[in-house]
Image (cartoon, helix red, strand yellow):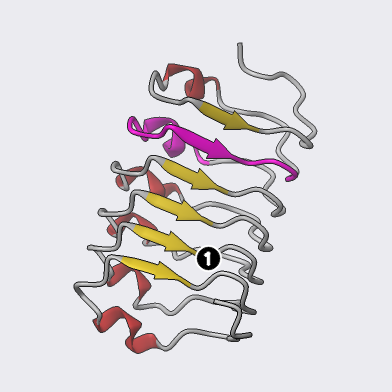
Amino acid sequence: DDNALPSLPNTLGHLYMLEKLNVDHNEIVVLPQSMPKLTTLTLLDLSHNCLRALPHKLGLMVGLQELYCHNNELAFVPESIKACTDLHTLTFSNNILSELPYGICELTNLTHLSVKNNKISVLSPGLSQNILLVTLEFEANPIEDPPQ
């Protein structure tokens, strides 16, 4: 981290046994197309970059347990994230998200979700069905009707 990297090599997808990848505090705008091949990855820290999008096939990264994407320029989260059923920590604070995919409600192991300081106006009522969710941070969003 802190290397001012503008990108990651597409060959990153060849690291089939990689479990942790921390590339926070760089200048990454786009992730390599090979990224979803990292199915053994348990921790992915992409925070404090310039990311505009996550891979549509993010759901192929079925080993993910922790995904840190705060302080980027993300406008959406791919619906395929629902396939990452081992996820327990998700951070999307300080982006430009206007909504979250319903698939996040299907992450039954999720214990921490942070979406502070985005443009989210509606939080899915399905989030209240997640009995393991311990921390939900959604302040500084224009929430019109918070879930009960």
Which of these two is toward me, 14 or 53?
Answer: 14
Q: Is residue 84 left or right of residue 74?
A: left
Give percent across and percent down for residue 97: 67, 49
Under tag 1, what secondary structure? Answer: loop
Q: Is residue 147 left or right of residue 133?
A: right
Looking at the image, residue 118 lies above or below residue 39: above
Q: Residue furthest front?
A: 2
Give percent across and percent down for residue 106: 37, 32
Residue visible at 53% across and 37% down?
113
- Residue 97 in view: yes
Q: Residue furthest top?
A: 148
Tell how many labels: 1
Which image quarter holds the C terminus?
top right
Which of these two is toward me, 71 or 51?
Answer: 71
Task: Mark 1: give few (<14), some (14-19) or many (20+) Cα within 10 Å.
Answer: many
Start-end of magenta stretch: 101-118
Give percent across and percent down for residue 35: 36, 73
Question: Residue 65 lies in magenta, yes or no?
Answer: no
Name the residue carrying label 1.
46
Q: Is residue 66 left or right of residue 17?
A: right
Question: Residue 113 lies in magenta, yes or no?
Answer: yes
Which image quarter holds the N terminus?
bottom right
- Residue 80 in view: no
